[in-house]
């Protein structure tokens, strides 16, 4: 019996010893431990539509342009291009020189046997863009190019008709003049196209990779600072990215904006990138283990789950508790987005058919709603009210402008409702509010909104859908009102104003089906102009028309609370673009010291 | 025996067709296919043409009867196509996830059964004593605590505070064991209570049978009665219970897989539900069905081998 007890004790001790031995590894190597809150999908650049897969892919694949890491706003800089595009006087032709020193690296060593492959050439970008148009690829990024490049839609149509895309066919609008020169010819001015060349959809894609087998998109062959080896094919619980020995190289930026200087991340100027040898993306979908791993130091970067917010951040937004004691740093960054409640422009009560009456109801409902209170109750203060469709920091955004219908003024709202012929809401039919989900948060939001509307006598019927059910109603113009959000694809207000352009009515992104010829005219005029003060003024004017018409109750931009450990250097949260791991450094000595102190 | 086996296999065909029909009706009339369609459309902008394209691509524009037989064909050929969400071959996805679930569940199940048998034997042997009452009480307590609570407690206390286990994670190969210890422990804690009560009842019932009383009357030593007679005969319901559990084991433990980042089949199914990945969901549900039907067949055949009367019926 004694022996049995000893043997059992030995086994238990061995199990605990095995369990508690840390991963460790070679301390001389710098590893950046990150997390992804969702599974990695396909690495096919034409279908990099989700943030999490794009973040991983952005460290391995590169495009012609990227965003300046230390600039205050999102400004383009060349990456695989030699310089910014040369634009013809009519704004229709973009000529881009591709750098000569960029090579692909195949970590699986199946396509390029030695790892280092051939040079990146202009033809690779022609190929990437053609893939977006190929119906068989079913790209989620096609809408960005649809109708923009001469001959591309015709090529796509021919592919649809014949059932097979002809990649050898020349297209007038997308040409490689030689290995180093890419020429894009537009059907009409589309200055935003330069931003699409910084998006994941147009990452350099070698055709050898796509042709390497049916599961080619389970791994990546890119020209970026890191690569994936053969062990890291989808699906994994973590993806280990290793420094690319064949990378073209880059220096830490010398020019820094005020924000970067204030953060103190401008000190590494001219140092060679990337700083860390390995980037690990751990897939952790549940918040509890993710939070515990952040606190334990296993993750270098993290966020604060809603349930733990009060233990980590005080009323003034400063770090408290364990994260503060561990010396973590908190960044609060407003997202480049807008959330909104839309009114169906075709609705006989709330929309254009109701004329001035409908307009006054919409304005009244906007005045009766308190976004500030919503942010306090539901966002833990982690959002900023928006006043127009244009997000903060974008051309056309006016930081001093206050939307007069966002003032939370119940008396004024009642007055407007009375002017519309519905004093105290009498005679106004019940308004159906379509929700995108049926979870507790959706129901709480629904009740909260209904409570505010009841103050002016407007009765709300909450309809809880699942996302597809909601979208189906929106597509069929059957949603009387509903809530949506839009995150920036690129840093141009056109990306947001298009949500109110009449030609984009549902199933396009204009879910309100808003239509105002004056707005359309300004949108059409401004969206084809090159960036500048004149264009921004037109954007502002268009946004103000929408404020007055009130097809939306403009809501808020959520604020990301991004945490990093005390030993992480140069980290800056950016919500547009990818490939930022190369700028982040780890102070190994500080890490060792901090972990030992625990 | 051979004709019995053939008969049983032939019986499976209408059963499978029925299951596929129920599945098909659920997914058509409780909203699955429409939801799926709206999920595969590009999130930021889509057109009427794209809606028609995807309807055609997935055969949703075909008459229902044709759609049903398409589904039957997929099951028969075990070709479910590719995941709409990840674009990967679904059979490959299943083949990669099932072993991870099995590594999680089989050892945990085996450990739990052994522990439950030992505790149940003690409780049965000392029936009515304080030990029996204490063990029964603890079993009920164990049954009453939800897996979710135990996972959060386990991760927070045992892994984060006391650093006895990793918080979560996964490695392919033997490295996985380190990450499986806590999930195994939690599995045992959750399942052992129920099984102790079940096994105890089986042992107590067996111990009350006439042949046991006869053995005692004849002066057979108590240890011999327990190990040679009671335990041996009580194994019949226990083994039946174990065999019935096997398909459940292959389907994994959704909560454990989610919280511990274990890439198992349960986790695959939840991800498919969240992303409305109908092709994957369809395949996983039908694979679950095949597991159950397959193991039911195995159990029936084993019974028939042991008891010839089953064959005659």
Image: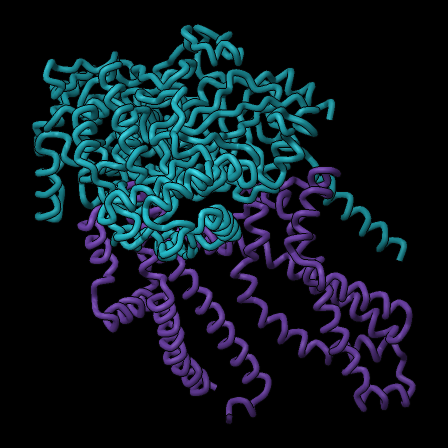
Chain colours: A cyan, B purple
Residue A279 at what x, y percent from top left?
A: 49, 27
Total number of numbered discs in the rendering? 0
- Say if residue B95 shows up in the picture: no
Does B281 sit left or right of A523 as displayed?
right
Q: In the picture, residue B207 is in which quadrant?
A: bottom right
- Say if residue B22 shows up in the picture: yes
Q: Name above or below for residue A597 compared with residue A468.
A: above
Q: In the picture, residue A596 is in which quadrant?
A: top right
The front one of A59 and B31 is B31
Residue A27 at what x, y percent from top left?
A: 61, 21
Does B294 sit left or right of A246 as displayed?
right
Residue occupying image coordinates x 46% and y 65%: B288
Q: Name above or below for residue A144 compared with residue A225.
A: below
Residue A335 at what x, y percent from top left?
A: 43, 29
The front one of B54 and A32 is B54
Residue occupying image coordinates x 57% and y 42%: A287
Does B221 sit left or right of A333 as displayed?
right
The front one of A155 and A415 is A415
Q: Which of the image's four quarters has the N terminus of chain A?
A: bottom right
Q: Name above or below for residue A17 compared with residue A533.
A: below
The front one of A540 and A227 is A540
Residue occupying image coordinates x 36% and y 20%: A398
Residue A234 at what x, y percent from top left?
A: 41, 42
Residue occupying image coordinates x 37% and y 16%: A68
Q: Which of the image's four quarters has the C terminus of chain A?
A: top right
């Amino acid at each position: 019996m004694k022996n049995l007890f000893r043997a059992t004790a030995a086994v238990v001790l061995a199990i605990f010893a095995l369990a508690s031995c840390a991963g460790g590894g070679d301390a001389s190597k710098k590893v950046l431990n990150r997390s992804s809150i969702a599974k990695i999908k396909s690495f096919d650049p034409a279908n990099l539509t989700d943030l999490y897969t794009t973040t991983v892919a952005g460290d391995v694949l590169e495009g012609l342009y990227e965003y300046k890491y230390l600039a205050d706003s999102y400004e383009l800089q060349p990456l695989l291009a030699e310089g910014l595009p040369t634009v013809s006087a009519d704004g229709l032709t973009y000529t881009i020189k591709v750098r000569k020193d960029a090579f692909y690296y195949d970590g699986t060593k199946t396509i390029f046997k030695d790892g280092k492959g051939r040079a990146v050439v202009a033809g690779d970008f022609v190929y990437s863009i053609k893939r977006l148009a190929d119906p068989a690829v079913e790209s989620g990024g096609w809408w960005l190019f649809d109708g923009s490049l001469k001959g591309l839609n015709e090529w796509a149509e021919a592919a649809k008709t014949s059932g097979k895309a002809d990649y050898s066919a020349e297209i007038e609008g997308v040409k490689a003049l030689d290995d180093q020169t890419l020429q894009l010819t537009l059907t009409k001015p589309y200055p935003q196209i330069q931003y699409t060349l910084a998006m994941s959809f147009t990452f350099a894609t070698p055709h050898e990779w796509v042709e390497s087998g049916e599961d080619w998109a389970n791994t990546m062959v890119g020209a970026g600072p890191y690569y994936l080896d053969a062990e890291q094919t989808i699906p994994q619980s973590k993806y280990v990215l290793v420094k690319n020995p064949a990378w073209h190289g880059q220096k830490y930026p010398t020019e820094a904006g005020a924000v970067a200087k204030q953060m103190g991340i401008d000190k590494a100027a001219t140092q060679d990138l990337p700083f860390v040898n390995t980037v690990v993306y751990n897939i952790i979908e549940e918040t509890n283990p993710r939070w515990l791993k952040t606190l334990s130091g296993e993750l270098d970067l993290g966020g604060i789950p809603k349930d733990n917010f009060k233990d980590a951040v005080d009323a003034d937004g400063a770090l408290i508790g364990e994260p503060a004691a561990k010396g973590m740093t908190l960044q609060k960054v407003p997202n480049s987005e807008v959330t909104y409640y839309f009114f169906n422009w075709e609705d006989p009560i709330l929309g254009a058919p109701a004329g001035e009456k409908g307009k006054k109801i919409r304005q009244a409902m906007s005045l009766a709603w308190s976004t500030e209170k919503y942010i306090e109750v539901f966002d833990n203060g982690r959002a900023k009210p928006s006043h127009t469709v244009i997000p903060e920091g974008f051309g056309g955004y006016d930081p001093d402008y206050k939307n007069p219908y966002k003032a939370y003024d119940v008396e004024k709202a009642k007055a407007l409702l009375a002017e519309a012929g519905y004093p105290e809401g009498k005679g106004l039919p019940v308004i159906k509010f379509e929700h995108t989900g049926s979870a507790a948060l959706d129901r709480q939001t629904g009740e909260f909104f209904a409570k505010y509307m009841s103050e002016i006598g407007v009765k709300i019927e909450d309809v809880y859908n699942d996302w597809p059910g909601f979208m189906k109603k929106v597509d069929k113009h059957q949603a009387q009102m509903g809530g949506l959000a839009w995150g920036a694809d690129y840093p141009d207000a056109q990306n947001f104003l298009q949500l109110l352009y009449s030609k984009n009515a549902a199933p396009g992104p204009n879910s309100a089906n808003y239509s105002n010829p004056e707005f359309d005219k300004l949108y059409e005029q401004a969206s084809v102009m090159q960036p500048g003060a004149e264009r921004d003024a037109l954007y502002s004017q268009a946004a103000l028309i929408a404020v007055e018409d009130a097809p939306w109750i403009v809501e808020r931009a959520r604020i990301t609370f991004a945490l990093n450990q005390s030993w992480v250097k140069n980290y800056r949260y950016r919500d547009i673009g990818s490939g930022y791991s190369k700028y982040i450094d780890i102070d190994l000595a500080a890490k060792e010291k901090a972990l030992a102190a625990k | 025996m051979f004709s019995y086996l053939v008969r049983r296999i032939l019986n499976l065909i209408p059963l499978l067709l029925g299951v596929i029909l129920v599945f098909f009706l659920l997914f058509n009339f409780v909203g699955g296919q429409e939801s799926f369609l709206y999920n595969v459309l590009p999130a930021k902008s889509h057109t009427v043409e794209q809606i028609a394209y995807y309807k055609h691509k997935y055969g949703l524009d075909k008459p229902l009867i044709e759609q049903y037989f398409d589904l039957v064909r997929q099951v028969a050929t075990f070709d479910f196509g590719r995941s709409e969400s990840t674009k990967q071959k679904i059979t490959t996805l299943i083949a990669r996830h099932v072993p991870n679930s099995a590594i999680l569940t089989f050892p945990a199940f085996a450990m739990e059964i052994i522990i439950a048998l030992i505790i149940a034997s003690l409780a049965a042997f000392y029936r009515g004593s304080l030990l029996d009452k204490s063990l029964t009480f603890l079993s009920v307590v164990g049954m009453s605590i939800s897996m979710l609570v135990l996972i959060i407690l386990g991760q927070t206390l045992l892994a984060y505070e006391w650093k006895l286990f990793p918080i979560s994670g996964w490695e392919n190969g033997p490295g996985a064991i380190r990450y499986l210890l806590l999930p195994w422990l939690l599995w045992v804690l959750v399942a052992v209570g129920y099984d102790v009560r079940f096994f105890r009842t089986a042992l107590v019932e067996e111990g009350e049978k006439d042949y046991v009383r006869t053995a005692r009357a004849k002066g057979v030593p108590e240890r011999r009665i327990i190990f040679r007679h009671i335990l041996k005969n009580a194994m019949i319901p226990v083994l039946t219970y174990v065999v019935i559990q096997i398909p459940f084991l292959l389907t994994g433990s959704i909560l454990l897989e989610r919280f511990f980042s274990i890439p198992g089949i349960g986790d695959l199914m939840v991800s498919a539900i969240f992303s409305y990945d109908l092709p994957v969901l369809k395949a996983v549900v039908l694979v679950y069905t095949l597991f159950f039907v397959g193991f039911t067949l195995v159990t029936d055949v084993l019974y028939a081998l042991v008891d010839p009367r089953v064959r005659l019926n």
